[in-house]
Image (cartoon, grey):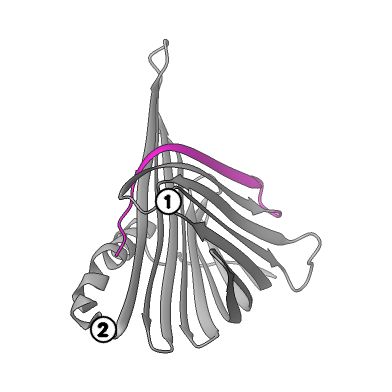
Amino acid sequence: MDDNVSKPGRNSSNRMKTILFLILFLPFSILSQKDTVRLSLDNSINGAYTKYTNNNNILNVGFVGDNSVNYKMLKFNTTSNYTISYRDSITSNEFVEKTNVGYGNVFVSNVYAHSYVRSIKNDNSFGLGYIHKFSIKKFFFSVSYAILYQRTFYENGSTKTVERNSFRTKIKYNSDLFGFSTEVYYQPSFRSMKDDYIVYGNAKIVLFPKKRVNFILQDAINYISKSKVRMLHNLAFGVEYTFKN
């Protein structure tokens, strides 16, 4: 692990706008090839507002996306999780974007993160891995392993690099009435698997998942064992509008 001073990478807000544009609009440019291209869009926005008797205003807004484009053996998948909290001023501004490009069962990946709470300006993990998918009736499973190289730029100008394992499990179930999905990443360092590790996790319950407007209960965690702020936790409940093909 090396610590040194370096100029941070791209501005996170510009990157987020670009990613959201690609997620929401780029796939429509290839709809004319729908006989050969398989497209899946699943995006939702949730929010909550509270005003206390002492006139404190609390606003929480979140965006969650799970999108993919497949062409024969080529696969592109991106998952997004963005949350911002406001209590008279911004108290949290967290963004994680996971992108995989694969051929068959082999893929290359990038995990990008920005964290106001953890003073992380730019975090990128690049990896190479293998994924296996299977289904049992209406349940869909996928497990994968990847080797990652992580480089983190902090707001104070310092950087940190770490080589990691990445183990991932995903389970998804959908019916007309009820839907459930969960995804967990466990990413221990090669040098210290016991003391230096990252856990990303999310679970989502949806009522009427095949409708554009549905009801959700969603929980997401982001745990970094070496961070001063180890756990970030986001629980959302409410009405969701989902874009699907």
User: As rendered, which of 202 and 217 lies closer to the eye?
Assistant: 217
Residue 159 falls inside the magenta stretch: no
Mark 2 vs mark 1: which is more N-terminal?
A: 2
Q: Residue at x 74, y 61 (%)?
A: 196
Q: Position of residue 48 (x, y in %)?
A: 39, 32
Question: Front-most of 229 and 158?
Answer: 229
Q: Name the outermost residue toward the top.
A: 53
Determine whether label 2 and label 1 are within 8 Å by CB: no
Task: Judge left or right: residue 3 versus residue 95.
Answer: right
Which image quarter is the N terminus in?
bottom right
Under mark 1, the amino acid is: Tyr
Label placed on residue 35: 2
Q: Position of residue 217 (x, y in %)?
A: 49, 41
Helix, strand or loop for disc 1? strand
**Dot 2 crowding, Cα within 10 Å, few <14, some 14–19, many 20+:** few
User: How many neighbours does mark 1 have within 10 angstroms: few (below 14), some (14-19), or many (20 or more)?
Assistant: some
Q: Is residue 221 visible?
A: yes
Give x and y (percent) for residue 46. Answer: 38, 42
Where 59 sits versus 92, above or below? above
Q: Amino acid at mark 2?
A: Asp
Under circle 2, the secondary element is loop
The answer to whether any part of residue 88 appears in the image is no
Q: Does 188 appear above or below 103?
A: above
In magenta, the rendered stretch is: 225-245
Closer to the camera in the image, 95 or 11: 95
Quarter of the image with the C terminus in it: bottom left
Residue 232 colored magenta?
yes
At a point 63% along the width and 66% down the height, the residue shown is 169
Q: Which residue is mark 1?
A: 82
